[in-house]
Amino acid sequence: MKKLTYSLILSAVIAIILISCGLPGGAAESQTVLPVAQATQSLSDLVSINLSVEYDTSVQYSTVGQVVAFKYKVNILKNDLTSDAPPNIIFSGASPVCPAVNTIGNGNDRLETGETFDCTLDYALTETDLNNGSVSANVTVNIYTVNSNTVSVNVPTIPPRALTLTVSANPTNYYQTGQTIVFTYTLKNSGSAQLGPAQFAVTDTLINAAAFNCGNADATIAPGANLTCTANYLVTQEDLSKASIANNATASGGGANPSQAVSVSVNKTTPPTGGTGTNVQHTVRNGEWLWQIARCYAADPVKTVEANPQLSNAAQLKEGMIVTVPNVGSTGKTVHAPPEPCVTLYTVKSGDTWSSIASAHGADPGFTQYVNDNLLAVGSQIKVPHYTAGMNFVVTNPTTPSAPTGTLSVVVSANPAMYSNVGQTITFSYTIRNNGTFVLEPDQYRITDKLIAADPFACGVPNTSLAPSATVTCSANYLITQDDMSKPSISNSATASGGGTFSSQAASTSIIRNATPLSLNAIPNPATYNQAGQTIAFTYIITNSTSSTLGPAQFTITDSLIGAAAFNCGDANTTLAPSATVTCTANYVITQDDMGKTSIANNAVASGGGAAPSQPVSKTITKQ
């Protein structure tokens, strides 16, 4: 730019001299001729720079100290400067490291049009970055005193503790007072660390002013995992004057900040149509079964089953299926139809009883107890059958609901029937059979096996109906423990329940421990010695002589000549198939004391993988 300005001034001076002296090129004395000014260009007209930024978007940034590797790419779009002024690369908003100018492009001290280079910045994440959920920056580079475009970067981070809440309503509309809206709350651990064990809670202004518990008091949520609970809302007369009702919920617990607020709207609709004697199409909701759907419509349950031959198993309904309910109102009772569900899934809270739950939902206490197999544990989810109040279903046993004459039996088997190492999986298979003469109403059948779990677990799909002699099957896995390896065998004891009845006898099976030991061979090299300080290299070969795969595990050698402590042989996660081997070595250095002997001998034993230790192996090294 200086050269351009000087050129204009010099032209003006020469013109004045020519005029005053009457020299060629000058004008007549009577005329004054001024130089023609040339337009001055700004630096931004002469220099143009483009800046972009990159980082690895495939990485999850979730740890304090984790490095985000930024790459700022600089492209000289235009450089029409005629001076050799230094480029002076200056960043604002970040401090990346750039290469020397004379290493860029043609290697001179000037940045030419079309040249590009990368500047790098390794940024270590802080706890604040993780808690904020992102790392953000607005960055500009200045070269030849000209600014580039500004690039904005926002790197998402995963906080160590974070809760995300989603809420759904069932049904999504209402039409009468007393109607139950079931809100389901799903708490997701959206952080990178486990949450809990702790009591998680939900605050929902529509349900209650105070927070209520979600899950057990010692619940844990792994990263990416969910915890689910429900709460019920009864439609009021005031709600019928509104077009919709909405909740406002947040979740908390486990050391995380409260979740974002979530709101779900439930819209008012017109009452259902369909009078007595008509057939209706019903969309199955979660937890419903065919007999209970028939009750909702005051229809005959047996006729309802017969009206749905498309179902291979009338008891195994799935949410979203369409079923036919014939002759609505034929039982002479009140017809209740969607949008309200026929069954509510309710999470048991402290202090709940069968009577209190049934009363809150318009259900019969005895029948509610019956369809849930009398399992009322805090934090568990039970089915509440609506429109059953007044059935007066009698519970004749305080621990077992009244039931038809059907009686269950259970058969259990184990595969494999022999174990040989810690961590080995034993699969138990259970077959529940209806030995009675009456079809058991749809239910969730369960197995109680203390070897597998402290609480009963589901067997088969929900809403399974068992005809006489029919069966339902399931399986569960058991992992062999270190304690099991000290026993000759382990046994289970399983009982079955469901359909309002239970198994009168427990079923049991035993799994035998495979006591076959490992095999070991030790090979010294050389097998003789002649001086102190000489090294004898022992090679140990461990063979899996059992009939089962051992590991993954750390196998070890104990050799009295090498040292008192055992040492590792092979990798920490070695897996040995039957007859497979793992090899390792250890060195022994001849001592002066050994030179006074005619020979020395080792004594080695191999162990690991849950198998019995090998027999001791001894090899003699002779002095020459």
Image (cartoon, helix red, strand yellow):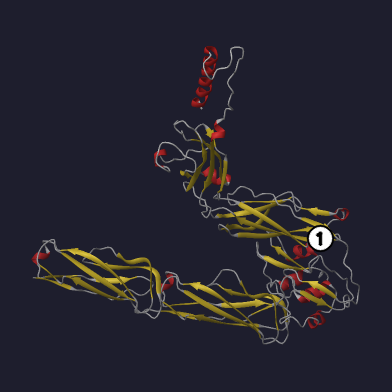
Left of 548 or right of it: where is 154? right
Corner quadrant of residue 29: top right
Height in image: 254 above or below 500? above
- Tell which of 54 and 283 is nearer to you: 54
Q: Quadrant of residue 449?
A: bottom right
Reply above or below: 201 against 619: above
State left or right for residue 272 relative to residue 75: right
Say whether residue 274 is left or right of residue 200: right
Give x and y (percent) for residue 469: 67, 87
Q: Position of residue 237 (x, y in %)?
A: 87, 55
Which residue was labeled with disc 1?
173
Q: Nearer the viewer, residue 264 or 499?
A: 264
- Residue 296 in percent (x, y) is at 82, 71
Q: Secondary structure at mark 1?
A: strand
Identified at 52% across, 14% down, the residue is: 17
Q: Is residue 115 left or right of residue 154?
A: left
Query: Dot 1: few (<14), some (14–19), or many (≥20) neighbours within 10 Å?
Result: many
- Residue 616 in view of the camera: no
Asked whether residue 196 is in view, the answer is yes
Point 56% across, 30% down: residue: 42
Q: Is residue 315 above or below residue 45?
A: below
**Residue at 39% in and 81% down:** 547
Q: Nearer the viewer, residue 620 or 285?
A: 285
Image label count: 1
Which quadrant of the figure has residue 539? bottom left
What's under tag 1, amino acid-wise? Asn
Q: Is residue 83 above or below residue 249?
A: above
Q: In the picture, which quadrant includes the C terminus?
A: bottom left
| Image location of residue 321, percent across then percent down | 75, 73
